[in-house]
Amino acid sequence: MATYYPPFRKQSPYLPFGEQRTGRFYGKDILSVKQFNRADLEYIFGVAHEMREMVERIGTFDLLKGKILANLFYEPSTRTSSSFTAAMERLGGSVIPINEVRYSSVAKGESLPDTVRTLECYADVIVLRHPEIGASALAAQYARKPIINAGDGVGEHPTQALLDLFTIVSELNQVDGLTVTMLGDLKYGRTVHSLARLLSLYDVKLNYVSPEILRMPAEIIQELNEKNIVQKEFTTLDEVLPQTDVLYVTRVQKERFENMDEYESVKDAYVITPEVMREAKDRMIVMHPLPRVGEISMEFDNDPRAAYFRQMEYGLYVRMALLAMVLGRA
Ligand code: ASP
């Protein structure tokens, strides 16, 4: 008689002999910041802090030895893809990199569900960046293995928001009571969509500074209003800069514009220079998800308030924490 092998499930109970997995995020997808509460964030940041200490002490260790990550990127990426690779390798695991989908079967017309169902045969977790809103949620419906959203079009970028918040906590030692000013392309910038939502778990004041045509989407403002978050919109920075504790600068997202004249009209709307920053507090930070294309001048880079390069490093620890958590090792 043929042996019956039960179908795989999202959280497979059939673990290799002797393997133990634990934790509230084990087997979970990371699709949106909406899935987190404050206790989750404290937990994630606690693990990220431990990751930092381990990396500083020993560099690489074998927490995820034998585990494989598939890095599936349908849009360009430098930091997100390389930091997930570094995170996996620092934890002793390995990576299937698919950065150029045009060289994979996607170019032959393979659907996203089929591509993720393929990769999960070989990998334990899939990191996905895709140009369409909701792509990661769609992939997660088909995948048994955890899907981590690394940016879904103009939708969300939850792991970026987690590392952004970890940066704020690490640099300023608090979140409650802060005034956070988001500057630039708030319409198409997915990082600010996720970060605004995540900050709404705290007692913060939010300023949105953007050109008229790049305002924060109304549904996000509405969502945060329902949580009684104080939000104010501006078109110039000078009014709010002196009270700002975190200035979160974004790139105008050229690739999302249909009309290039429109892009040209707003691309240089704001430029942060040492002179502009004279009006800001001494104890505050300037963040940017990067890449920058001129919205922060290089002359500002050596200012201690320029936190954007440190922000990238915090990202490594947060992504190490997330991988360890979804694979049940934290
Ligand atoms: N790297 C960030 C993102 O993928 C920000 C940007 O591209 O401007 O959304």
Image (tube, rainbow, N blue to C red):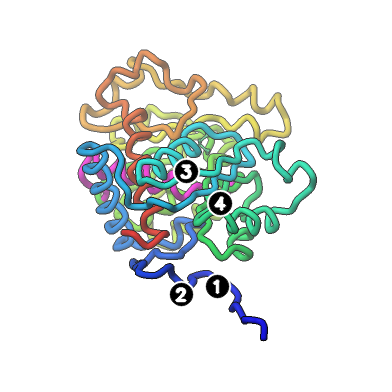
Q: Nearer the viewer, residue 273 or 104?
A: 104
Q: Nearer the viewer, residue 234 or 224?
A: 224
Q: Amino acid at mark 1?
A: Arg
Q: CA distance from mark 1 to mark 3?
A: 34 Å
| Residue bounds of the magenta highlight | 154-175
Q: Are marks 4 and 3 in contact (CB under 8 Å)?
A: no
Q: CA distance from mark 4 to mark 1?
A: 38 Å
Tell me where residue 172 sits by quadrant. top left
Which residue does the numbered mark 1 point to in the structure image? 9
Q: Amino acid at mark 2?
A: Pro
Tell me where residue 52 sits by quadrant. top left
Q: Amino acid at mark 3?
A: Val
Give the SS element for disc 4: helix
* 162 lies above or below 283: below
Which residue does the numbered mark 4 point to in the structure image? 218
Q: CA distance from mark 4 to mark 3?
A: 13 Å
Q: Quadrant of the N terminus?
A: bottom right
Marks 1 and 3, the one that precedes in the sequence:
1
Q: CA distance from mark 3 to mark 2?
A: 37 Å
Q: Are marks 4 and 2 in contact (CB under 8 Å)?
A: no
Marks 4 and 2, the one that precedes in the sequence:
2
Which residue does the numbered mark 3 point to in the structure image? 192
Which residue does the numbered mark 2 point to in the structure image? 13
Q: Is mark 4 within 8 Å of ligand 1?
A: no
Q: Nearer the viewer, residue 237 or 282?
A: 282
Q: Main secondary structure of the magenta part?
A: helix
Marks 3 and 2, the one that precedes in the sequence:
2
